[in-house]
Amino acid sequence: MNFKNIFKSLKNRDMLKRVTIVIGLLVVYRFLAHVPVPLGEPSTFQEAITNLIQKSDFGSFLNLISGGGLTAFSILLVGLSPYITSSIVVQLITKAIPSLEELSQDGETGRRKISQWTRVLTVPLAIIQSIAYIFILYQSVIASNTSLSYTPTTTDWVLSVTAMVTGSIILMWFGELITEQGIGNGISVLVFVSIISQLPSTLASLGSALFDTSGGTLSLFGWLNLPVNPMIFWILLGFAIALLIVIYFLVKLNEAQRAITINYAKRVHGNSTYGGVKSILPLKLIAAGVVPVIFATAFLSLPALAGQLIQTINPDGTFGTTLVTLFTAPSASNFPIYYPDGITPQWFFYPFVYFVLVVLFTYFYTSIIFNTKEIADNLQKQGAFIEGVRPGGQTAKYLGKTINRLNLFGALSLGLIAMLPFLTDYVFILITGAPIGLSISGTGLLIVVTVALENLRQLNSRALMVTYDEYK
């Protein structure tokens, strides 16, 4: 990555304009994340949201990708979730219906129609999710015996849902505007900024804990005392080292690929000869990216959310309690509630199911985005072939076998990354008897690293285009 070239490209007026537009949109996005939903007392609903997040791993993930919009009870509470869901649904339907698949391959016109359908589907999904969130939060407030200063009217409900749907549509629009600038995928950039925006509050809480010397100070070799908490210092040092190691392996996994040599047959056209050259077909180790982790998190969240709704409607029932207990991710916040006597076999249920789902979804999504038959047909039409493999069906079979082998290692790697919070908590439970509140977020870290590498790659490519004349 040539950062010197990127900074040099900012002298170009068009490049500077594109970067300025992206930064401006991100600033407006962060401002909107603090505009509250116009419904009653926001502080009352914020308490309900905090309780909901502590009970749901999916709630924590939604708060992460919404940049804290969930805990702030802002108009961006729903965030990008409807658009992401709509994109996945449209993509699955496109692959399942041959006529739609042909339309998606019909150049720019087909892609625009698919994009338009994605936008249209986003609106009803945003409405449904907004109504569901408001209903669950309102019922949570009532169930907690928290008194509201007034009873929301139908107009209040309509206004709040409209504000949340509008916030979701604005985010979708921002994402497309950022994509049009050509220096990164807009939706990925917004998710990246959402996760990064949580760092200041995290660092502030860590700083206050680190410089709390009520339990003593750190002595270095008996001749220098540092005004820091010794236990917190060594814990943070260990996490910093672990974080660097994890980031290193994440970069390696994200960039890892299998290069398959492609040969092009010689063709004679008139007095000219074409072909007879070689190229490579790169197969990424983790072709599915972070999608399997998101799918698994969303899938496991449904029973927990259903259990919370059942508990709200029927507090005396045991079915809702069982669903919440089994499908709630073990964490430092709920460990004293669900595991007062320490680790039980139930503690391993959620991590095990989570790991299995990540592996299965990796195979499933890779099979959708990597069509071996289509790639084999395209190679055959171009007069290309893999050495030692016959064109057509044999090539498709060879590619399928290769990608399945890569998937095995890639899926297990993704699963282990997703398990990082549980593994660190398990170690601290064995050592101290309780999980630590600061766990490495494998999902968030994977998203940050993947998006950062991809956007830097696109930014570098555009910088090369801008500064090309200087190297001629």
Image (cartoon, grey):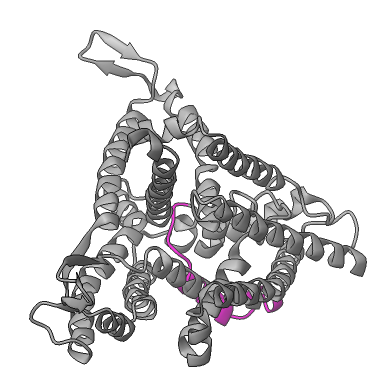
Apparent side of residue 169 relative to residue 285 in the rendered image (left or right): right
Q: Position of residue 137 (x, y in %)?
A: 71, 64
Q: Quadrant of the N terminus?
A: top left
With respect to residue 85, does 376 lie above or below? below
Give the residue drawn at x 71%, y 72%.
Answer: 123
Q: Judge whether residue 24 is colored magenta.
A: no
Apparent side of residue 402 relative to residue 459 in the rendered image (left or right): left
Q: Position of residue 217 (x, y in %)?
A: 36, 19
Give the residue drawn at x 39%, y 80%.
Answer: 368
Apparent side of residue 166 relative to residue 63 in the rendered image (left or right): right
Q: Nearer the viewer, residue 108 or 269?
A: 269
Q: Could one spot residue 15 in this view of the protein?
A: yes
Q: Quadrant of the C terminus?
A: top left
Q: Could one spot residue 318 in this view of the protein?
A: no
Q: Examine the image and state in which quarter residue 236 appears.
A: top left
Q: Judge whether residue 317 is colored magenta.
A: yes
With respect to residue 455, does 240 lie above or below? above
Q: Position of residue 145 (x, y in %)?
A: 76, 61
Q: Position of residue 264 (x, y in %)?
A: 18, 74
With respect to residue 216, does 360 lie above or below? below
Q: Nearer the viewer, residue 381 or 45?
A: 381
Outermost residue, top side: 223
Boundaries of the magenta span: 311-332
